[in-house]
Amino acid sequence: MRTAVVVGAGLAGLAAAGALARTGWRVTLLERAERIRPEPTALVLWPNGVRALRALGLGGGLDAIATTLPAMGIRRPAGQWLVQPRPTPPAHAPVVVHGEDLHDALIAGLGDQVEIRTGFEVREVRADDGDRPAVGDGRSHLAADLVVGADGVDSVLRAALAPTSTAVSSGCTAWRAVIPWYRAPRLAADQPVTGETLGAGYRFVSASLGERGSASGRGGIYWVATAAGAPRPEPPATQLALLRRWFADWPAPIGELLAATEPEDVVQQEIRELRPLPRSYGFPVGPGGVVLIGDAAHAMPHHLGQGACLAFEDAVTLQSMVREAVPGQALREALEGYTRNRRPRTVTIVRHTRRMAAVLQARGRLALRARDAVLSAISPRLVGSAAAAIAQWHPPN
Ligand SMILES: Cc1cc2nc3c(=O)[nH]c(=O)nc-3n(C[C@H](O)[C@H](O)[C@H](O)COP(=O)(O)OP(=O)(O)OC[C@H]3O[C@@H](n4cnc5c(N)ncnc54)[C@H](O)[C@@H]3O)c2cc1C
């Protein structure tokens, strides 16, 4: 039986481990943490991510936990529209899911064919042509026909195989929270929960996770705030106070949402990205090889909400490329095919993300009038072409 070791049990690793196990691979999933833990926040899944999850056979689970986002447009902090909301056909609408619900769906998708080893931190990578690739934690080694590096932005596998690609700061920090329904503010009917507001150096996005009182999924109101600059060293209560001050004059319901948030709801994350992207995502080794997926391959800022969506695309593509490939020339070629398929796609999305980052981070570098021009002239076009690029993806046959 063909064997695979997947390193990292984040969204990318869970999706890939399940995908490989369902196509007849014997999979070992390694995670350095003692427990496989989901993020207590939420994610937006764009049509490409939804399509990828359906192609992975996880569509049923997704339908039970996803809330379709209404057309929301983008506002300026003073309230006027930067990008008008445009109705989207339901099949192309993004959805929002709680991270813990998504995690449960991916765990269910592992079935009983995946051996999970937690507390295993990969520190060594053996990729000498001739032998099968192997990873080790300093005490033991595991060799396999295929090693999947799903170990996130600081990937040990990427450091070994594509060392010129390094993780750098994107120059901004994000804060996320889910306010459970029982604490969520009751908003006026003309005050939609779901919306995006973009100012120079700051951005706030919120979305309703299910409906108040609904029994399905972990409900509440999700928000993500982004600000140019480094992570704050202060305790969460002080960070929350800062967020309330930064967004104080922004349109409703931002103030109400921040007021209803407790410090323990807030997750702060420094935003980092890979520069440059690895030139290859697949590395033939011996009769098989190593492949990089998810943030290990193409970590990027969250401005287009694409990191997890691309990780699911990666998992579907990998599954399709290696479905019939036996160790030897066929598997080596499949890994090269994986790079040919995934690299142009991820380069395109990174390019769109960087344009969005330039708008978001216009603060400080430009005079006020120039910043306004950047925000109001570029954004509608930018958002439209990014959305088109995102939607273009379809699972390989
Ligand atoms: C603020 C914010 C908002 C976002 N919003 C969205 C969104 O709306 N939509 C979207 O699609 N994406 C979004 N993303 C991006 C998305 O969260 C990430 O791209 C995605 O979670 C990456 O998953 P991953 O599995 O590749 O990496 P990770 O989640 O980093 O998982 C890596 C795993 O590998 C383990 N690991 C690391 N090193 C080792 C080792 N040496 N040995 C063993 N195990 C190891 C880690 O413990 C971890 O479990 C957002 C990101 C941020 C920061």
Image: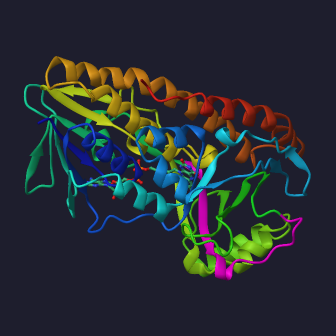
The structure residue drawn at horizontal position 8% and vertical position 57%, both measured from the top left corner, is: 139
The structure residue drawn at horizontal position 73% and vertical position 72%, both measured from the top left corner, is: 257
Q: Nearer the viewer, residue 224 or 209?
A: 209
Horizontal arrangement in the rendering, residue 154 relative to residue 47 (left or right): left
Horizontal arrangement in the rendering, residue 77 relative to residue 67 (left or right): right
Instruction: Give the vertical position of 174 relative to 291 (above or below).
Output: below
Whether 175 is among the magenta residues is yes
Q: In the image, residue 361 lies at what x, y percent?
A: 70, 47
Q: In the image, residue 193 lies at what x, y percent?
A: 76, 64
Horizontal arrangement in the rendering, residue 166 relative to residue 122 (left or right): right
Q: Which quadrant of the figure has residue 265?
A: bottom right
Horizontal arrangement in the rendering, residue 132 relative to residue 246 (left or right): left
Task: Note whether residue 235 is visible.
Answer: no
Q: Which residues are magenta?
A: 170-191
Q: Nearer the viewer, residue 50 or 246?
A: 50
Q: Nearer the viewer, residue 167 or 185?
A: 185
Task: Quadrant for the N terminus, please.
Answer: top left
Q: In the image, residue 249 lies at what x, y percent?
A: 86, 68
The number of numbered badges drawn on the structure is: 0
The structure residue drawn at horizontal position 67% and vertical position 33%, both measured from the top left corner, is: 386
Q: Nearer the viewer, residue 22 or 186?
A: 22
The structure residue drawn at horizontal position 38% and vertical position 43%, both measured from the top left corner, is: 296
Q: In the image, residue 381 lies at what x, y percent?
A: 78, 31
Instruction: Give the vertical position of 229 relative to 274 (above or below).
Output: below
Whether 103 is among the magenta residues is no
Task: Note whether residue 186 is visible.
Answer: yes
Instruction: Give the vertical position of 213 relative to 26 (above or below).
Output: below
Task: Quadrant for the C terminus, please.
Answer: top left
**In this figure, which colouring scheme has been used for the structure?**
rainbow
